[in-house]
Amino acid sequence: MANVLLGVTGSVAAYRAADLARDLMREGHAVRVLLTRSAAQFVTPSLFEALTGQPCLVDTFEEPEPGRMAHIDWARWADVAVLAPATADSIVRLAQGRAEDMLGSSLLASTAPWVVAPAMNPQMYASDAVREAMSKLRARAAAIVEPTEGDVACGENGQGKLASIGAIAETVESVLVRCRLWEGCKVLVTSGPTREPLDSVRYLSNRSSGKMGSAVARAGLLMGAYVTVVAGPQSEPLPLGVKEVRVETAQQMLDAALAEAPGSHLIIGVAAVADHRPAVVFDGKRKRDGAYSLELEENPDVIAALAAAEPQALTVAFAAEVGEGTKEARRKLESKGVDAVALNYVAAIGQGMDADRNALTWVTDGSEEGSGPMSKLACALWLLEKAFNIRNTG
C-alpha cells in the first residue's frame, strides 16, 4: 500500500477530509495530514491525529522528530500528495510555487504526483485567476477532481461543491496505479536536436528545444522508472533524478545511446536527429567568399540502430510531420523496426517544436489513436501508458 500526504485548506468542506482520510486508510494506505491555518479554524489537528495515528502539522517549524525538518521528511515519505479540499487561494499559491506554510513547503519539496480537489464559491471557481492556476497544475501532471454542481456554503448554486469522497479516493488509486506502471524498469530517452558542424563555429541543426524529451523523462520518473536521457544541445533543462548524457552530433548520440541501451525495457527516440551532415567540415571559420555548394552525407538512424541492438526492449520512434503524416508514420514503423511510432504534427500553431503543448498519434501495426492537444507532460504520460499496454499485452 501507499503513503498518502493529505493537505487540507480553509474551506467549509474541510470536515469532509476526515472521511477521505478514513477511506484511504481502509484501503490500507498510511495517511499523514497537513492543515493550513485557515483549515485549522474548521477542523483541529487532534481530529486527524486520532483518525490516522500520525502527527498532524500546521506550522512550518513543527518538528515531530527534533532536529528533523518535517517538510522535507514528509515530502520524501509521500507516494502521492492530495489537496482536498483545495481553496482558490491554495490553488493559486501552489501554481505560483509559493511555500508560505507547512503545506506549501511540503508539496514543493515532494516529487510525488498531486491530486487536487477544488471546493469554493462557483464564481471564484470560474474566475480567470483560478482557471489559469488550474491550467498550470494540469500542465505539471496534477490530477484534478472537478467539483460538482450544487448548493455551496455561501448559499449560491453552481459548480464549486467538493467532489464526492469516493471520486477523490478513486482518483488517488488511479494515480497510484499509474505511478507503478514502469516501476523498477530502465527507460532510455533520446532528446533535443543534434548539431552537425560546417566549420569551427557554424552547424546544421533544427528548432527542437528538448521540451518533449524532457517531458517524457519526467513522465518516466513519475511512473517509477530509472530514466537515462541522451540529450543533444537542448535549451530545456532535464528533470532532477535522470541520468544525463550530453552529446552534440548524431554519431555521438548513437554511440552514447548504444552504450546506455543494454538492459533497457523501453527506448523512446524523441530526439530530432539531423538526417544529414556535411561530408567535409571546413577547418577553422570559413570566410564569406561567394556562393559555394555543400555536399551532405547521411547520418545514422539512431532509433533504428537501437531497435536492432536491443530487440528485447520496446522501442518507440517519433515522427515529426507537417502534413497528415500517417502514411509516413507507418513507413517508419516498418523501416525502423520499432514497436510503435508517435506521430507528431509540428506545423500547428502553438504545438510541436519549441512549444509547450503537443498532439500525438500513436501508430502501431494494428491501430491508430490520437491524444488530442495537451501539455507535453500530459502527452508524455499518455504515451508511456500506451507503451505499457503494448508491453503487457504483447
Image (tube, helix red, strand yellow):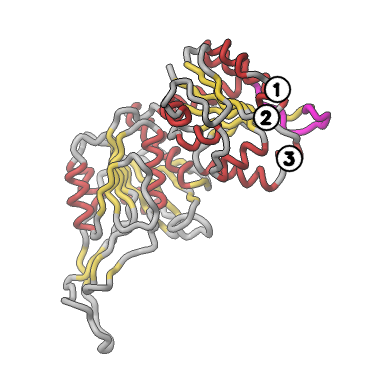
As for residue 155 lying within the magenta part, the answer is: yes
Visible residue check, residue 329:
no
**What percent of the width, then of the height, locates residue 129?**
67, 46
- Give amino acid for label 1: Phe
Q: Residue at x 59, y 24 (%)?
A: 168
- Magenta span: predominant SS is loop
Q: Secondary structure at mark 3?
A: helix
The quadrant of the image that shows the C terminus is top left
Amino acid type of the residue tagged 2 in the rendering? Ser
- Name the spot of residue 240 as percent of width and height, x first: 36, 42
Q: Earlier in the sequence, mark 1 or mark 3?
A: 1
The residue wearing badge 1 is 42
Q: Secondary structure at mark 1?
A: loop
Q: Which numbered dot is residue 38?
A: 2
Q: Amino acid at mark 3?
A: Met
Q: In the visual, does 114 lie left or right of 353? A: right
Q: Residue furthest right?
A: 155
- Residue positioned 25% across, 59% down in the render: 248
Q: Is residue 265 left or right of residue 330?
A: left
Residue lying at 29% horizontally and 52% vertically, measured from the top left: 231
Looking at this view, is 304 or 137 the one in front? 137
| Residue 374: mark | none
Residue wearing tag 3: 124
Percent across and percent down for residue 333 are: 31, 46
Q: Over which residues does the magenta segment extend?
A: 152-164
Residue 327 place in picture, x, y as percent: 38, 52
